[in-house]
Image (cartoon, grey):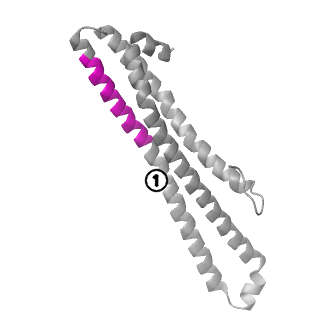
């Protein structure tokens, strides 16, 4: 409904908004790919950490027999730090994405306000009432778009986790 109202109020402004859309989608896609990569790395680090912990528990008698407790603790600490750093990097990207989306939305809003204001002042293409209708409908569309961008990030993290979970030894996982 809002999309229909956007085009009904001013098709020129709607086309300007649609021309700005690919740049926003490019940003969201780029960040989503990076999050998928970082999420895959974090999943691998967690798997390595779990493997070290499991080996230590199963081999506790051998570890104690050779007095290797400190070595195993340090090995686990190192892997735990690597996992933590990888997870922090992934979380940073996850927090940057909504900010990028908001920034892009503000830039698109400023562009639309500038062009629409210019059209109103020239008195030719759009009335102030229709421009307000356009703005309300356009900004009502922003919330679902933000949710979709967040959904993309969640899907990328899920694909990375699924790729780790369903990976076949020696080949691949989900692409």
Query: Could you tell me which residue is drawn at 41 percent across and 19 percent down?
Result: 14
Across and down, in percent, residue 17 comes to: 40, 25
Query: Could you tell me which residue is drawn at 44 percent across and 22 percent down?
Result: 140
**Residue pointed to by mark 1:** 92
- Asked if residue 45 is among those painted magenta in the image, a careful observer would answer no
Q: Residue furthest left?
A: 121
Depth check, front residue: 4 or 47: 4
Query: Could you tell me which residue is drawn at 49 percent across and 48 percent down?
Result: 94
What's drawn in magenta, residue-wise?
98-118
Across and down, in percent, residue 164 comes to: 69, 56
The image shows residue 152, relative to residue 15, as above or below, that is below
The image shows residue 103, relative to residue 68, as above or below, that is above
Across and down, in percent, residue 40 comes to: 61, 56
Query: Could you tell me which residue is drawn at 24 percent across and 18 percent down?
Result: 118
- Asked if residue 104 is among those painted magenta in the image, a careful observer would answer yes
Q: Quadrant of residue 15?
A: top left
Q: Is residue 42 left or right of residue 68?
A: left
Q: Is residue 168 left or right of residue 15?
A: right
Depth check, front residue: 86 or 58: 86
Across and down, in percent, residue 29 comes to: 52, 42
Q: Tell me the chief SS of the magenta region.
A: helix
Q: Quadrant of residue 129?
A: top left
- Which structural element holds mark 1? helix
């Amino acid at each position: 409904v809002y999309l229909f109202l956007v085009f009904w109020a001013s098709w020129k402004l709607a086309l300007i908004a649609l021309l700005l859309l690919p740049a926003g989608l490019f940003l969201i896609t780029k960040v989503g790919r990076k999050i998928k990569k970082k999420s895959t790395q974090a999943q691998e680090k967690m798997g390595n950490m779990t493997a070290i912990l499991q080996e230590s528990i199963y081999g506790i008698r051998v570890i104690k027999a050779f007095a290797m407790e400190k070595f195993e603790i340090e090995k686990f600490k190192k892997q735990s730090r690597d996992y933590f750093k990888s997870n922090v990097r992934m979380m940073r990207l996850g927090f940057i994405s909504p900010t990028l989306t908001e920034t892009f939305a503000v830039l698109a809003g400023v562009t639309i306000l500038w062009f629409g204001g210019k059209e109103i002042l020239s008195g030719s293409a759009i009335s102030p009432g229709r421009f307000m209708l356009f703005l309300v409908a356009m900004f009502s569309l922003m919330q679902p778009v933000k949710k979709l961008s967040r959904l993309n990030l969640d899907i990328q993290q899920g694909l990375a986790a699924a790729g780790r979970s369903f990976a076949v030894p020696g080949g691949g996982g989900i692409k």
